[in-house]
Image (cartoon, rainbow, N blue to C red):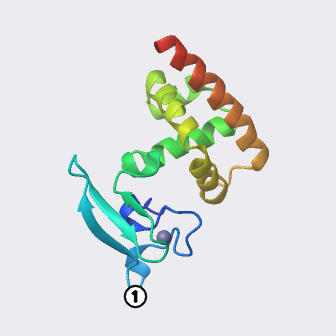
Amino acid sequence: MEKLAQTKDFCPNRACPDYGKLQSDQALPNLKRISKTKRGVQRYQCKTCGKTFTETTGTIFYRKHAQANEILEVLAMLAEGNRISAITRIKGIKEDTILRWLREAAHHWEELEEVLLKDFHVKRAQIDGLWSFVQNKGEKKLSRDR
Ligand SMILES: [Zn+2]
């Protein structure tokens, strides 16, 4: 499976012609480092569209690089109708962890949906089912936590 890219590997602006194009594949990289934020996070600017962003901009993937595939696998399993308890047993991931991922997934749904459809071959109808599941589980649990 392909490694998921980090934010700084490509322009995160969906409207940009260079959106999703890895810097390593470009003859002339379109991202350049600019000043850091107050907290010392590196900022980048895309020379193609002019947008600026930080290396922490973006999705669950970017922040949890190592875990990204596992999260996606779990989401794909849920989409295919597996119960959380089954996934806990099969993958050895705690239920709390899965619920936490679902909460995060709810905030990054667009990106996740795209990858699940494209790379995990989850069907559109399954994605829609998963989304209501994510909203339910994620949000219910979230309000209970607080
Ligand atoms: Zn751009």
Q: Is mark 1 within 8 Å of ligand 1?
A: no
The one of 27 and 93 positioned closer to us in this rendering: 27
On the picture, is 15 further left or further right than 10? right
Please name the residue shown 50% across and 35% down the image.
104
- The percent position of residue 23, horizontal first and vertical second, equals 39, 75
Q: Does residue 6 show up?
A: no
Identify the residue under disc 1.
Answer: 27
User: Which quadrant of the figure has residue 115?
Assistant: bottom right
- The percent position of residue 40, horizontal first and vertical second, equals 20, 51
Q: Does residue 120 show up?
A: yes
Tell how many labels: 1
The one of 100 and 10 positioned closer to us in this rendering: 10
The one of 118 and 54 positioned closer to us in this rendering: 54
Q: Is residue 81 above or below residue 1?
A: above
- The percent position of residue 28, horizontal first and vertical second, equals 38, 86
- The percent position of residue 141, horizontal first and vertical second, equals 54, 17
Please name the residue shown 28% across and 69% down the image.
33
- For label 1, the SS is loop
Identified by mark 1, the residue type is: Ala
